[in-house]
Image: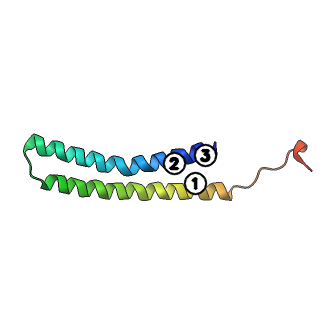
């Protein structure tokens, strides 16, 4: 189950980094074609998408570190009657 949790974190991290950049670039291309804007709109929204990706990556990394610290600091469960030596 722990490996599945790690796989979900990797997937979440990848999506949180890639989605904003792709979304802003696709939106910029659509705006450029729809309203006959220059290349400047693609550059501006590309930079905005890149900055958003960095921000979401930082927050995702902070969450992963917080969860890993909580998992490593959790006390071990007490022994039950049948588990004693």
Tell me, yes or no, whether the two marked residues, 1 and 2, touch with CB atoms within 8 Å. Answer: yes
Tell me, yes or no, whether the two marked residues, 3 and 1, touch with CB atoms within 8 Å. Answer: no
Q: Residue furthest top?
A: 34
Tell me the mark number nearer the camera, choosing from 3 and 1.
Answer: 3
* Helix, strand or loop status at disc 2: helix
Mark toward the start of the polypeptide (3 vs 2): 3
- Residue at 36% x, 58% y is 54
Q: CA distance from mark 3 to mark 1?
A: 14 Å
Q: CA distance from mark 1 to mark 2?
A: 10 Å
Instruction: Determine crowd level at label 2: few under 14, some 14-19, many 20+ residues with C-alpha closer than 10 A.
Output: some
Tell me the mark number nearer the camera, choosing from 1 and 2.
Answer: 2
Q: Which residue is mark 1?
A: 67
- Residue at 8% x, 43% y is 35
> Can you give x and y, in whole percent of width and height, for residue 24 in the image?
25, 48
Q: Going by the image, does 2 lie left or right of 80?
A: left
Mark toward the start of the polypeptide (3 vs 1): 3
> Can you give x and y, in whole percent of width and height, for residue 67 in the image?
57, 54
Query: Which label belongs to residue 9?
Result: 2
- Residue at 29% x, 47% y is 22
Q: Going by the image, does 29 lie left or right of 37?
A: right
Mark toward the start of the polypeptide (1 vs 2): 2
Type of colouring: rainbow
- Residue at 90% x, 42% y is 82
* Helix, strand or loop status at disc 1: helix
Query: Which label belongs to residue 3?
Result: 3
């Amino acid at each position: 189950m722990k490996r599945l949790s790690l796989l979900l974190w990797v997937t979440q991290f990848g999506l949180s980094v890639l989605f904003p950049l792709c979304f802003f670039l696709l939106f910029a291309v659509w705006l450029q074609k729809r309203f006959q804007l220059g290349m400047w709109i693609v550059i501006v929204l590309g930079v905005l998408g890149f900055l958003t990706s960095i921000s979401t990556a930082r927050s995702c990394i902070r969450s992963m570190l917080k969860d890993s610290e909580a998992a490593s600091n959790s006390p071990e469960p007490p022994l039950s009657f049948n588990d004693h030596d």
